[in-house]
Each structure stands twice: as C-alpha cells, then as structure tokens.
Amino acid sequence: VTGVRSVGRVRVREVGSKTFVDLGVAVPRHLSFEESHAVTREVQDAVLELSPEADVVVHTTPVAESEGFLERVEAVAAQGHFAIHNITTHLAPQGLLIDLDLEVDPNLPLERAHALATELELRLSAEFGGSQTRSARRVADVNVHLEPRSEEMIRGAEMSAADAARYIVRIEAVGCALPHAHGIQDVHLQKLDRTVYLSLHLLLDPDVPVREVHEISEEMESRLRREFPQLGRVVIHAEPFVETRK
C-alpha cells in the first residue's frame, strides 16, 4: 500500500468462524490526519482481499524513517500547523539553503507574521542542525517568505466580451511564441476586486520533461504579467497535446 513504510506487529486470531486481524503500520510523519486515515483504509481493504469477512484493526505510527529532504521540511511544517508551499533548495559554498513560502492571515500585523516565520525557521534549523543531508552538505540557512493567505471567498465579476477578447488575443500570441506549445484552450477571466483572475490550459508536446514544462509555464506567466500588470492569480494548467487525425 502506498504510504506504508513498514509493517510492524501482526496478530491474527480466530474466534469461532470469525477472523480478527490486528496490525501496526508505519507511515510518513508528514501525512495529514485525512491522508493517514486513507492509508489505514487501504491497508484494511488489502487485508480484506485475503479474508473478506475478517474484523480488521489497523494502528498507524508516524515515523521519519526513509524520509526525503522535502518530506522532512513538510513534516516539520505540519507539526507546527504551518501552511507552506513552493519549497526550493540550492547548494551554496556554505551549505544547503532552504527557501519556502509561508501562508499567513492577510490581516496579521507584520510583527506577528514575522514571529511565525522565525518560529518555523527555528524548527527547521533544529530539524537539520548538525546533521548531514544525503549529499553530505550542511544546512546553512532557512529563508521564509511571507505570503498572504487567499481569502476563503471572493465574489468575482464576469469581464465584458470586448475586454476578454483583448486579453485572449494577447494570451494566444504569447502562448504561440513559447517552445513546444501547440495552443491555448479554456481561457477563463474574472474581475476580483482590483485584480484580474486568469486560468488557462496550455497545450505542450507530450514528451517535454516536467521541469521544462514548469519553466515554460513560468515564462508565459512572466510575459503576461508584463503586458497586464493588473493580473492577480494566474493558473496555467499544462496538458499534453494530442494531434487528431482526420
């Protein structure tokens, strides 16, 4: 079962015609409660395939064993209930540098938000402090970028057909100029307060590596923002281009 690091003690007993199974599994410590519960259900289903009428109890234990570097960062954030994303690392002469975005309440005073960022930096420094990564590099610094958390509900307004057409013409022109691109589909535009929300599907060659797909998407977003400074949230969904034969 995906998510199970190892299986611990397994107890199987029969009482009359009923089979009882009690087992423990180790799961990554960064899993949320919902994710851990989903793993538990998959383990139960796997056992029920062997014994459909069994009474199965699964105990999960969070462990750090076999964690990758990013999993360790996510685990630390999850333990402190920090919402993070965009985790990046790079090697510098002094060691490994960690950069990430921390989502905070947009109305939070800077002093309080900075204190949260500092707490997260200290937790990560404690996690990696004095230890060597798999590449035998010391973690030299942790940089946390504060980012306002999106409002739960913002009422959008449809853009006029004329304004939307002006955007779409330029969006398609930018998309056609990108490497490996075969067009734009499903462009969606809305006015959100003082910004414009944009989502679209970018059709790319199916054999392009994900790393390059990300670079192409970032380049497209950068070009669009230069043309339309009022853009707020931009969502570019890359899809493999499939040529249809007539």
Image: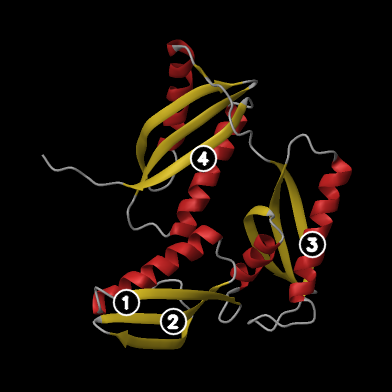
| Callout 2: SS | strand
Q: Viewer-proximal residue, 29 or 213?
A: 29
Q: Which residue does the numbered mark 3 point to in the structure image?
A: 121
- The first of marks 2 and 1 along the sequence is 2
Q: Viewer-proximal residue, 142 or 51?
A: 51
Tag nearer the camera, 4 or 2: 2
- The first of marks 1 and 3 along the sequence is 1
Tag nearer the camera, 1 or 3: 1
Q: Which mark is residue 23?
A: 2
Query: CA–CA distance between discs 3 and 2?
Result: 37 Å
Q: Is residue 52 left or right of residue 130?
A: left
Query: Which quarter of the rendering shows the C terminus?
Result: top left
Crowdedness near tag 2: few (<14), some (14–19) or many (≥20) residues, C-alpha within 10 Å:
some
Marks 2,1: beta carbons within 8 A:
yes
| Callout 3: SS | helix
| Callout 1: SS | helix
Marks 4,3: beta carbons within 8 A:
no
Q: Which mark is residue 220?
A: 4
Q: Residue 198's spot in the image, x, y percent?
A: 50, 30
Tag nearer the camera, 1 or 4: 1
Marks 1,4: beta carbons within 8 A:
no
Q: Residue 168's spot in the image, x, y percent?
A: 43, 24
Amino acid carrying mark 4 in the image: Met
Who's the residue at 37% across and 68% down the image?
A: 42
Who's the residue at 79% across and 73% down the image?
A: 126
Q: Which residue does the numbered mark 1 point to in the structure image?
A: 47
Q: Which mark is residue 233?
A: none
The relative height of residue 161 versus residue 4 in the rendered view (above or below) is: above
- The first of marks 3 and 2 along the sequence is 2
